[in-house]
Amino acid sequence: MSDIQKQREALINVLPMAIEVPSTDEFDDPTYRPLLGPKGATVGELRLTVEDLRKRITDDLLKAEVLAYLLAWVASAGADDDARVSEIISRHEGDKK
C-alpha cells in the first residue's frame, strides 16, 4: 500500500459518518447528511459545515474563558462548591452601593 493510500485510509477512518449542515434560513433546522456515498454531502455542504463548526468552536472558547473568569472571581470571593453563583454575584452587587 502506498503512502497516499495509507493517508487516505487513515483520513477516512477518522471522518464522521454524517455531518450537520446548517440551514441557510435562520428558521429551519440543520440537515444531517452522510458524509460519503452516493447521497453524501456536497463540497458546498461540507464548506458550510466547517464554517459553522469553526464559528461554534470560537463561540464556545469565548464562553469557556468568560466562565473561567467568573469561576476565579467567585472562588476569590470565598465561595464554596455548594454556593449558588447568583448568590455570590448578588452579595457583591450590594457592596457597590
Image (cartoon, rainbow, N blue to C red):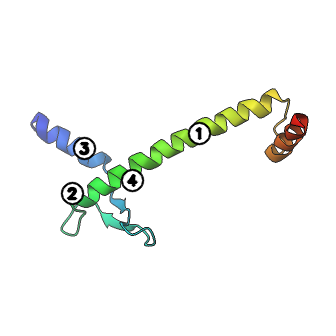
Tell me if residue 83 can be seen. no
Q: Earlier in the sequence, mark 4 or mark 3?
A: 3
Q: Earlier in the sequence, mark 1 or mark 3?
A: 3
Tell me if residue 65 can be seen. yes
- Between marks 1 and 3 in the image, the one whose residue lies nearer the viewer: 1
Residue to which mark 4 is pinned: 52
Give the camera-side residue of 43 and 12. Answer: 43
Residue 43 shows which numbered tag? 2
How far, Cα to Cα, is label 1 from label 3? 29 Å
Query: In what element is the residue under mark 1?
Result: helix
- Whole-percent x and y of residue 67? 65, 39
The answer to whether residue 37 is above or below residue 87 is: below
| Residues at marks 4 and 3 touching, judged by CB atoms closer than 8 Å | no
Q: Earlier in the sequence, mark 3 or mark 2?
A: 3
Query: In what element is the residue under mark 2?
Result: helix
Residue 11 shows which numbered tag? 3
How far, Cα to Cα, is label 4 from label 2? 14 Å
Residue 64 shows which numbered tag? 1
Query: In what element is the residue under mark 4?
Result: helix
Give the camera-side residue of 31 and 15. Answer: 31
Mark 1 surroundings: few (<14), some (14-19) or many (≥20) residues within 10 A? few
What's the residue type where badge 2 is placed? Val
- Between marks 3 and 2 in the image, the one whose residue lies nearer the viewer: 2
